[in-house]
Image (tube, rainbow, N blue to C red):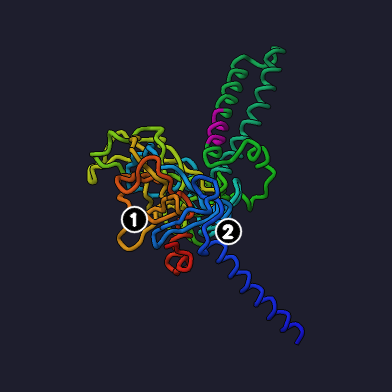
Amino acid sequence: MRGKKFLAVLAAAGIILAAIVTLRYFGNERPETDVQSGHKDETEEVHTDERTIRLHKEDLKEFGIEVEEAMQGKLTVQLELPGEITSNADRLAHIVPRVPGVASSVFKNLGDNVQAGEVLAVIESRELADTKAAYLAALKRMEIAQANLKREESLFKKKISPEMDYLGAKNAFDEAQIELKSAEQKLHAVGFSEHYLAELPHHPDATYTRYEMKSPLRGTVIEKHITLGEVLKDDSVAFAIADLSSVWINISIYQKDMDSVRKGQPVVISAGMSIPNAKGTVSYISPVTDEETRTAMARVVLPNPKGLLRPGLFVTAKLSVDETTVPVRVPKTALITEGNETMVFIETAEGFIPQTITTGRSDDTYIEVTSGLKPGQRYVAMGGFTFKAQLSKGAFGDGHAH
């Protein structure tokens, strides 16, 4: 029971405090300090608009309301073009087996993350076994030819063996060496290193048919065309691995806009769907146009650390192509809409009142005001929605000065 009484007392105290704050901010009395002049005026009678809002300077700060002076400024002229997110082709790998065979093990699936050098699948290949056997045979023949050459050379120097035998041994050694090099190159082309070839003579015979498909880079499996037991050719694309830490934005440039796009130009990419806008620059412009669409392509490379920019998504690219100066501009945060009207709150000697304005050109941050606001007038640049919300609720009804 004591707990309930205590909560009731707290609730009553909150109601009283709220009433006091309302009277303080929105009461009939004029604030002690004039918002514009900063001095007290206790004798002058005030006549205000029905929707005049009066606040102390400290109240403006408390509510996060910013007041600025209307003046001329620059607007960025922007060009909006469609685009699409694609994988960074410089960080994309199509994995082929390089030797024909049968998939005996498959370790990765679509969407799996892989590391550079990680095994994706294993293929059993008879052709690979033949290539390894040919290398081992060539290695053995070269060893024999080398030993025979050494023996014949020694006998020739001692004048025991004729020069013809020495030259024959040398020729056989050269041929064996060429054959070994050819066998080595075939295994290197498949992807085996010098270290692997040095260890190959010691491997068990059962491993001669085994070929491991490895990822050459760190990334994500975005394509998979291999199943257990499937027969693959040496040019079959089994996996596609993409490093999605960066992506390409391919922007379509219409014929009429081609002169406005250039390398190094700032671009803002908007993908929607709660994905934050991203900023970049044009890094490439195609020298030819598409025969069907009659559009050229510009490319922007963007970092994608969180993976929000998914290949295949359509985007809007805003390119800054020029700047223009307008007599009056305000930040878009200052705009208040009511029905079909656009307003800002302007500061007067009596307080703040809503003022209907007409707008013109705009960019991402600012908008031109063509009427309703003159240079030098002070207006609410940030926080006007607080005033609108209170007016809508009639919260200032008791605070009007007549």
Q: Nearer the viewer, mark 2 or mark 1?
A: 1
| C-alpha gap between disc 2 and disc 1 | 60 Å
Residue 107 circle label: 2
Question: Magenta segment: does it hold 367?
Answer: no
Badge 1 marks a residue whose secondary structure is: strand
Q: Quadrant of the N terminus?
A: bottom right
Return the disc, 2 or 1, that comes first in the chain's sequence. 2
Could you tell me which residue is drawn at 57 percent across and 32 percent down?
A: 180
Badge 2 marks a residue whose secondary structure is: loop
Q: Of the residues shown, which amino acid type is indicated by label 1?
A: Thr
Residue situated furthest right in the rendering: 2
Task: Report crowding for label 2: few under 14, some 14 to 19, many 20 or more residues within 10 A (C-alpha).
Answer: few
Residue 312 placement (x, y as % from top left): 40, 54
Q: Quadrant of the C terminus?
A: bottom left
Residue 342 circle label: 1
Magenta part, dominant SS: helix
Q: Of the residues shown, which amino acid type is indicated by label 2?
A: Phe
Specify whether residue 174 is in view: yes
Could you tell me which residue is drawn at 28 percent across and 36 percent down?
A: 258
Question: Magenta segment: does it hold 180?
Answer: yes
Is residue 14 toward the left or the right of residue 220 in the image? right
Residue 228 placement (x, y as % from top left): 52, 62
Task: Report crowding for label 1: few under 14, some 14 to 19, many 20 or more residues within 10 A (C-alpha).
Answer: some
Residue 225 placement (x, y as % from top left): 45, 57
Q: Nearer the viewer, residue 255 or 149?
A: 255
Could you tell me which residue is drawn at 65 percent across and 42 percent down?
A: 200
Residue 27 placement (x, y as % from top left): 52, 64
In terms of image quadrants, where is residue 328? Answer: top left
Count of marks, rendered view? 2
Q: Nearer the viewer, residue 160 or 138?
A: 138
Could you tell me which residue is drawn at 55 percent across and 54 percent down?
A: 56
Residue range highlighted in magenta: 178-185
